Amino acid sequence: MHIRPIERGDKDRWLPLWRGYQAFYKVQIPDAVTDLTWSRFFDDGVPMHALVAEDGPGLLGLVHYVFHASTWTEGPYVYLQDLFTAESARGRGVGRALIEAVYDAAKTAKAARVYWLTHETNTTAMALYDKVADKSGFIQYHKTFQAGARSRA
């Protein structure tokens, strides 16, 4: 298994993993957003990155991560936004290898922290996360806005 940055020629092999990730979380991201996400990986002005786990001709997994500034540290934080392993590759260390590769990218950039979220029902992934990271103790709150919607004052 080899972990490497995603390449433009990977889209047809990346897309099934991306769709599998969405199916796992029971969401359907519009194709226009998927295309925008794909283009962001190759835009030097956007701090969004993607790595893939590869074994021969197939991709085994993906990880997407975003660098951002913090008010608490000099160096950036890294938000590990998406992590997915093909069902046929689970239990082979793919998820751990992808997380470790993000850690390496964060260290190279002198980032202060890598963090991520997962759903409380994702117990299989949490068994791994408990081995490679610390629980923050924080609870996430969010408010979702529809594109083009106006908020009330």
Image (spheres, rainbow, N blue to C red):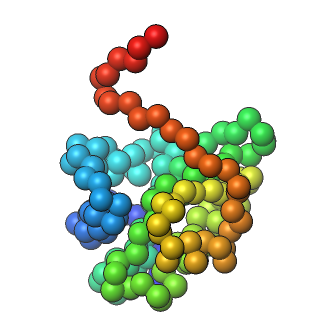
The number of callouts visible is: 0
Location of residue 137 by image quarter? bottom right
Q: Position of residue 146 (x, y in %)?
A: 32, 30
Q: Where 149 falls versus 108 (above or below)? A: above
What residue sits 38% from the left and 85% below the top? Answer: 89
Tell which residue pokes out farthest to the top in this image. 153
Say left or right for 55 vs 128: left
Query: Is the residue 35 above or below the residue 11 in the image?
Result: above
In which quarter of the view is residue 8 placed?
bottom left
Q: Mark yes or no: residue 122 visible.
A: yes
Q: Is residue 88 left or right of residue 118?
A: left
Left or right for 69, reference 46: right
Q: Is residue 9 visible?
A: no
Query: Where does residue 90 sit, x and y in percent of width and height?
Result: 42, 84
Vertical placement of 20 versus 34: above or below? below
- Where residue 71 sits: x, y (%)? 74, 35
Residue 110 percent across, percent down from the top left? 73, 54
Question: At x 25% / y 53%, what residue is drawn?
Answer: 28
Q: Is residue 91 left or right of residue 100?
A: left
Q: Is residue 70 above or below residue 15?
A: above
Q: Residue at x 52, y 85 (%)?
A: 93
Query: Residue, x 58% and y 64% (percent of image)?
Result: 102
